[in-house]
């Protein structure tokens, strides 16, 4: 039996008054007017389906030599879209993970205007909010939370994905994020182990952000900035919308400079430090070429904007919805790794941002397909020899593990690989060879058509291995259980 994943649904825009309340029902002209500017015109209708989580926050960012601090209020209206009665809902406080190295506190939590006392787990990352009365299936209710988040200057943790280093702010997930309700897994997702890979697991949501920030900061965020209004106190007020995105990410620096262009109706922006200005155009062109290749290979990118941003991440790059970051050490036209990482991270806009998955349990589902995107890019832009060179690289980097005790299925959770080197070798190098093998089985054109079908079916949703298996079996009109089992391992949904 396939595990059913049902997320928190939110069916109305909400005000930021403490008691709060809906200001526009989801669906119909209000949502199109509110979020349409962030979509390509031909995809505005994607906003209409019911039960997308909607966040609205008013937040202030203050930064000095010691720290960057967010303080704000989050309002959300939740619909129980499961078949279970809910006694509580769960928010994730990602900055409190050791791998993030930040601090977040939450207070003044209310449900329908009535104060409640939430319970925080021992890791400080799972906040359970009790409901005064159990929410029946289909019932909606409104929550509000006040939060403060601090990034101490100079603190480095894991990939520096959440950091304030040398005046550069990297702040994804700086606010409380609704967890995912998994009916067949016993309730709310609560994974707290994050030694490598990605930590986030969330539902596609709509965001409205009212942000006040220092005027000398140049900000890159998910979504589209509708207005930027200078104040008289050295700050700027931003109005930002980010519909149909799995999270809201924000990067900032006084040293950012921007190059922009438009392709296929998408504004592409490259943010880099002034010292790296000669290479900014190279980053922009790589993003444009990647967008063009993947629009054709996988399906159309629906958003009006895509940002590529230089940060001091210790990873090569990191993906966020509508925004990717590339490590400052790679930001060079002459660095071949720079080219590879930009392509890979842009491919994540299809595999992670648009088609989601649990990145802690099934990391291969987005990472392997992003790597397969690199194969497609080199085949399209360089030719057969370039494409084969990428495939050879995967094969050669995985080969030391082949036939050893470390050669494991590609479908394990991150934590089960034991260490980061084995995780990378299996998920980033062996796993894309699974799709190369499928190419050899059915042909490249058939595989790409199957991926486009899969993308169309699960865009904005969460997919699991059984969903990919079922989608491919329909596309290829053949049984694939044994092939998936031999590569991926066992998972619910296999015969």
Image (cartoon, rainbow, N blue to C red):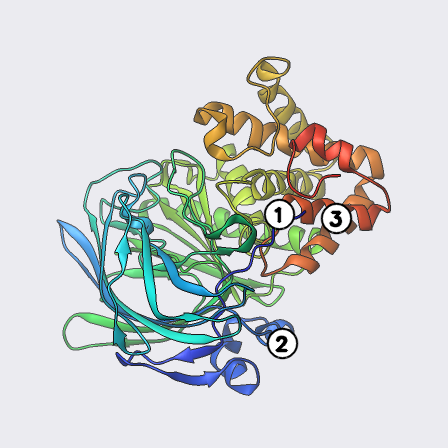
Q: SS class of the residue under badge 2? A: helix
For the residues marked 2 and 3, what is the alpha-carbon distance in whole angstroms? Answer: 27 Å
* Residue 60 seen in the current view: no
- Residue 190, image x and y in percent? 41, 48
Q: Nearer the viewer, mark 2 or mark 3?
A: 3
Instruction: Judge by depth and name the residue closer to the eye, 175 or 309.
Output: 175
Q: Which residue is mark 1?
A: 464
Answer with left or right where residue 8 lies relative to residue 192: right
- Residue 112, image x and y in percent? 33, 78
Answer with left or right where residue 295 lies relative to residue 362: right
Q: Which badge, 2 or 1, comes first in the chain's sequence?
A: 2
Q: Which badge, 1 or 3, comes first in the chain's sequence?
A: 1
Q: SS class of the residue under badge 1? A: loop
Q: Quadrant of residue 97?
A: top left
Above/below status of 292 relative to 235: above
Q: Residues within 10 Å of mark 2 (few under 14, many from 20)?
A: some
Q: Which residue is mark 2?
A: 45
Label pair 1/3, CB-CB below 8 angstroms: no
Q: Quadrant of residue 161?
A: top left
Q: Nearer the viewer, mark 2 or mark 1?
A: 1
Answer with left or right where residue 102 lies relative to residue 311: left
Q: Which badge, 2 or 3, comes first in the chain's sequence?
A: 2
For the residues marked 1 and 3, what is the alpha-carbon distance in whole angstroms? Answer: 10 Å
Q: Which residue is mark 3?
A: 470
Residue at the extreme right of the image, as rendered: 477
Instruction: Judge by depth and name the residue closer to the eye, 431 or 224.
Output: 431
Q: Quadrant of the C terminus?
A: top right
- Name the residue at 57% across, 44% down: 366
Above/below status of 103 relative to 488: below
């Amino acid at each position: 039996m396939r595990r059913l994943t049902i997320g928190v649904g939110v069916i109305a825009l909400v005000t930021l008054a403490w008691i709060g309340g809906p200001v526009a029902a989801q669906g119909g002209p209000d949502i199109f007017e509110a979020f349409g500017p962030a979509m390509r015109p031909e995809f505005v209708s994607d906003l209409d389906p019911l039960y997308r989580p909607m966040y609205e926050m008013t937040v202030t960012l203050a930064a000095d030599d010691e720290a960057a601090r967010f303080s704000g209020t989050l309002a959300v209206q939740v619909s129980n879209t499961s078949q279970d009665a809910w006694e509580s809902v769960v928010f994730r406080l990602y900055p409190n993970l050791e791998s993030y190295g930040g601090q977040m506190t939450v207070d003044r939590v209310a449900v329908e205007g009535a104060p409640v006392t939430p319970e925080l787990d021992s890791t400080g990352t799972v906040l359970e909010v009790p409901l005064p009365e159990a929410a029946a299936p289909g019932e909606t209710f409104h929550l509000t939370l006040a939060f403060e988040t601090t990034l101490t200057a100079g603190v480095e943790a894991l990939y520096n994905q959440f950091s304030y280093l040398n005046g550069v702010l990297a702040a994804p997930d700086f606010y409380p994020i609704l967890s995912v309700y998994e009916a067949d897994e016993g309730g709310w997702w609560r994974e707290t182990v994050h030694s490598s890979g990605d930590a986030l697991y969330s539902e596609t949501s709509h965001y409205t952000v009212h942000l006040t920030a220092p005027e000398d900061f140049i900000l890159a965020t998910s979504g589209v900035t509708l207005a930027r209004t200078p104040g008289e106190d050295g700050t700027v007020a931003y109005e930002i919308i980010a519909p149909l995105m799995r999270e809201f990410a924000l990067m900032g620096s006084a040293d950012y400079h921007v190059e922009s262009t438009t392709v296929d109706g998408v504004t592409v922006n490259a943010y880099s430090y002034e010292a790296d200005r000669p290479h900014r155009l190279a980053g922009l062109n790589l993003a444009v070429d990647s967008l063009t290749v993947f629009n054709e290979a996988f399906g159309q990118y629906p958003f009006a904007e895509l940002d590529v941003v230089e940060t001091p991440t210790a990873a090569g790059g990191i993906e966020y919805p509508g925004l990717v970051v590339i490590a400052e050490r790679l930001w060079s036209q002459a660095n071949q790794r720079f080219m590879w990482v930009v392509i890979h991270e842009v491919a994540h806009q299809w595999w992670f941002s648009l088609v989601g998955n649990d990145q802690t349990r099934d990391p291969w589902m987005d990472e392997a397909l992003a790597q397969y995107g690199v194969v497609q890019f080199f085949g399209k832009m360089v030719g057969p020899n370039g494409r084969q060179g990428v495939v050879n690289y995967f094969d050669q980097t995985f080969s030391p593990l082949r036939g050893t005790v470390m050669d494991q299925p590609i479908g394990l959770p991150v934590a089960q690989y034991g260490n980061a080197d084995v995780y990378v070798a299996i998920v980033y190098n062996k796993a894309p060879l699974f799709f190369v093998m499928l190419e050899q089985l059915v042909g490249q054109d058939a595989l790409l058509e199957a991926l486009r079908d899969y993308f169309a079916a699960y865009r904005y949703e969460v997919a699991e291995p059984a969903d990919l298996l079922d989608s491919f079996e329909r596309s290829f009109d053949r049984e694939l259980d044994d092939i998936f089992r031999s590569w991926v391992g066992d998972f619910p949904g296999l015969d």
